[in-house]
Amino acid sequence: MRAARLVALVLVGLGVVAYCSWPLEFLVTTGVSPLHDPVGDLLTGHPLFRGAQVVAGSAFLLAGPPLVRLAPVHWTGRLTAGSVSLFGALVFAYALYPGSVAISLLTNITFVVGSCSLVLWWPPGWRESAIIGLVLVVLTWLAVLVAGSLGPEHFAGLATRAQHVVRAAQLVLGALYVLRVTPASRYVPRAG
């Protein structure tokens, strides 16, 4: 279990750092407006960002199996670990096909499903944090949709960057859970 925990923490940590590489846009010339252009536009603006997304996607994808070993043996725990891996695969795919509406939609749905799964199985205390995270994930997705539907010059860049920060915070919260909570048993009794 210690090895699985260490591997999961390292991979999720690496994934979060690479996923949140967008502040580097202030240090390199990209031609992308941080306020008005979606963060995904950075993938065509400079090769650094595409490489960072490939690293992030790979790290999240590989974090799934160790997370499965740490999660309780029930469908919601498995759903959480699977969501992290699927999120990684979609981040990787989006790096290869930037601007894909289908991949973007699947990424958002996967992240919402993964956030919902945390609410269903995390213990009290942690569950409240998961609920706040879920609400923020949904609100930032709505902000991205509204900003995108209004067209250019309506802060789509700000909305997508906020979405990245919220997702990263949710992933860090999950890493803290893995770090702080020692599972007493992987087998959780069924209710009723």
Image (cartoon, rainbow, N blue to C red):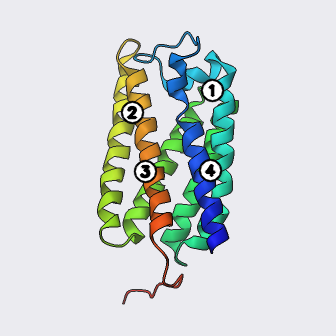
Q: Earlier in the sequence, mark 1 or mark 2?
A: 1
Q: Position of residue 37 (x, y in %)?
A: 47, 17
Q: Earlier in the sequence, mark 3 or mark 4?
A: 4
Q: Amino acid at mark 4?
A: Phe
Residue in front for this viewpoint, 86 or 128: 128
- What amino acid is labelled 1 in the image? Phe
Q: For residue 98, what is the image quadrant?
A: top right
Is the residue under label 1 in contact with that under label 3 (CB below 8 Å)?
A: no
Q: Is residue 8 left or right of residue 192?
A: right
Ranked by sequence position, the earlier of labels 3 and 1 is: 1
Q: Give the SS element for disc 3.
A: helix
Q: Check disc 1 and report its element: helix, strand or loop.
A: helix
Q: Report helix, strand or loop for mark 2.
A: helix
Q: Which residue is labeled 2 in the image?
A: 162
Measured in 3D between alpha carbons, the distance from the residue under mark 2 to the one under mark 4, in whole angstroms, is: 20 Å
> Which corner quadrant of the image does residue 40 belong to?
top right
The residue that label 1 is drawn on is 49
Cβ–Cβ below 8 Å for labels 4 and 1?
no
| Among the two numbered marks 4 and 1 on one chain, the one whose residue lies closer to the N terminus | 1
Q: In the figure, 42 relative to 177: above or below?
A: above
Mark 4 element type = helix
Amino acid type, residue under disc 2 in the picture:
Ala
Give the mark nearest the N terminus, 3 or 2. 2
* Image vertical order of residue 19 relative to residue 98, above or below: below
> Which label number is shown at residue 170?
3
